[in-house]
Amino acid sequence: MLVREKTMLPQTRFLSRMLGVYCLLMGLFMVTRAELAWRMITLFCQDQPLVFIVAILVLFGGLAMVLAHNVWSGGAATIIVTIMGWATLAKGVVLLFAPPEAVMNFYLQIIHTAKVMYVDGALALVLGIYLSHAGFKSGVAT
């Protein structure tokens, strides 16, 4: 069996489900609409007011996840959820404080072509399948 976590905290179950479905949907979008995703990232990097608003929202989401779920033991899904919370918080801080040129250069150099979207999308799909399975198979609905 893919997931063997006997007891999952309610917040782990919720975040595993939420992040799993999010990764599934975003991965599917990146794989099926790679060119559009690439264009959206390029345009996003060029719109500093939008980057600022997204930074605030990402920072808020990351803080919420870290404050609700800073658990470093209990199985793979639990640790993945915690890492995703910290990564989200870090991304929000970077988007808020990094110079706009640095943000643009990072995204445009790392994701230098729409073809990278297929790899990122596939990774998101795998992560989404795992987290969704862990969250929805872990017990009764929250």
Image (tube, helix red, strand yellow):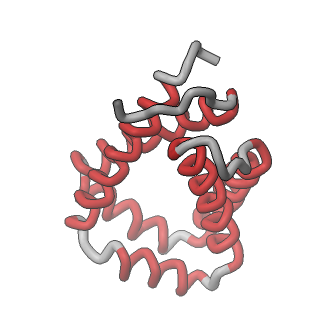
Q: Quadrant of the C terminus?
A: top right
Q: Residue furthest top?
A: 140
Q: Confirm whether residue 82 shows in the render.
A: yes
Depth check: give the residue in front, 33 or 4. 4
Q: Confirm whether residue 52 shows in the render.
A: no
Residue 72 spot, x, y in % from top left: 67, 52
Task: Judge left or right: residue 65 versus residue 81.
Answer: right
The quadrant holding residue 40 is bottom left
- Identify the residue at image location x=33%, y=45%: 126
- Identify the residue at image location x=30%, y=42%: 28
Residue 135 spot, x, y in % from top left: 52, 29
Q: Quadrant of the N terminus?
A: top left
Q: Residue furthest right?
A: 67
The quadrant holding residue 113 is bottom left
Task: Judge left or right: residue 11 versus residue 34.
Answer: right
> Compared to 139, does 5 lie above or below?
below
Numbered-mark total? 0
Residue 94 spot, x, y in % from top left: 64, 74
Residue 8 spot, x, y in % from top left: 62, 30
- Identify the residue at image location x=33%, y=44%: 125
> Compared to 88, does 13 lie above or below?
above
> Compared to 142, does 100 lie above or below?
below
Depth check: give the residue in front, 58 or 88. 88
